[in-house]
Image (cartoon, grey):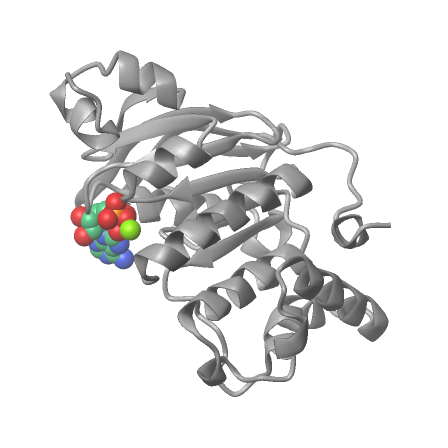
Amino acid sequence: MTAISEIAARQEVAGLELRGITKAFGQVEVLHGIDLSVRGGEFVVFVGPSGCGKSTLLRLIAGLEEVTDGDILISGHDVTDDDPSVRGIAMVFQSYALYPHMSVAQNMGFGLKMAHRPKEEVARKVNAAADVLQLTPLLDRRPGQLSGGQRQRVAIGRAIVRDPQVFLFDEPLSNLDAELRVEMRMEIARLHRELGNTMIYVTHDQTEAMTLADKIVVLRDGRVEQTGTPAQLYDDPGNVFVAGFIGSPK
Ligand code: ADP
Ligand code: MG
């Protein structure tokens, strides 16, 4: 049994559907009716200028914010009103959000421990994820004793051990230097191939978008501007705005 299959035992990969997602903070509407279908196992990348609503959309999918209007379906089930803990979603943040006083192993196992999973199961899954992410020698360290890239690996490991249906990444590599970004990008591509989960990934980096995505969603001012494969958007950007984000010559 490979380390990955130790964690991910599911047969079917969940897809995701957004129907008319609207979000207002007070009087200010920041998302204006987002519709999107994501196939099970698809790698979808959101791009768009700062403030266009990318993080808000991820937070709504994760259940960290409530939608103002619209529905969120995972595997065909309406989860719009469900608690974050039962949606089967794990989110990896730009800031890593690790607990400084806990070891790497404790950080990675924390979610399962909170879900009252048996100790042996927590240990087995943490060890498997550490193996996959080359973190085994670091399991007893604290986050403060790790490099930025290692911290982000721990944050990804913490998501993996929960065996989520859907992974959400919010600019996970933007705090890393250029060389490490390339390495981690390849790592994430490999994880996607091996885990086969549905992944939604926000980035500012054109290379990340073009190399990771099955499908790119360009957001602008709280709306979907254009959706397509990297090649479609590169060859046929709908307008100068999309061309600017994808780096195509239009
Ligand atoms: P992005 O991730 O694309 O940079 P965000 O989703 O963070 O954009 O923000 C979208 C818009 O929503 C911005 O105008 C931002 O100021 C606003 N916003 C985000 N979170 C809140 C909040 N908790 N309260 C009020 N406004 C918010
Ligand atoms: Mg953001």
Which image quarter is the C terminus in? top left
> From where the camera sits, is residue 69 visible?
no
Instruction: Identify which residue is drawn at 36% across, 44% down.
Output: 202
Judging depth in this view, the residue of 236 and 219 nearest the camera is: 236
Judging depth in this view, the residue of 221 and 197 nearest the camera is: 197
Residue 125 position within the rendered picture, expressed as x and y whole percent measured from the top left: 75, 63
Judging depth in this view, the residue of 114 and 234 nearest the camera is: 234
- Vertical side of 160 occupied by 245: above or below: above
- Vertical side of 161 occupied by 216: above or below: above
Residue 157 position within the rendered picture, expressed as x and y whole percent measured from the top left: 60, 61
In the visual, does 105 lie left or right of 26? right
Instruction: Identify which residue is drawn at 48% across, 84% down.
Output: 145
In the visual, does 212 lie left or right of 231? right
Residue 207, picture quadrant: top left
- Vertical side of 18 occupied by 61: above or below: below
Residue 29, picture quadrant: top left
The residue sitting at the bottom extreme is 101
> From where the camera sits, is residue 123 visible?
yes
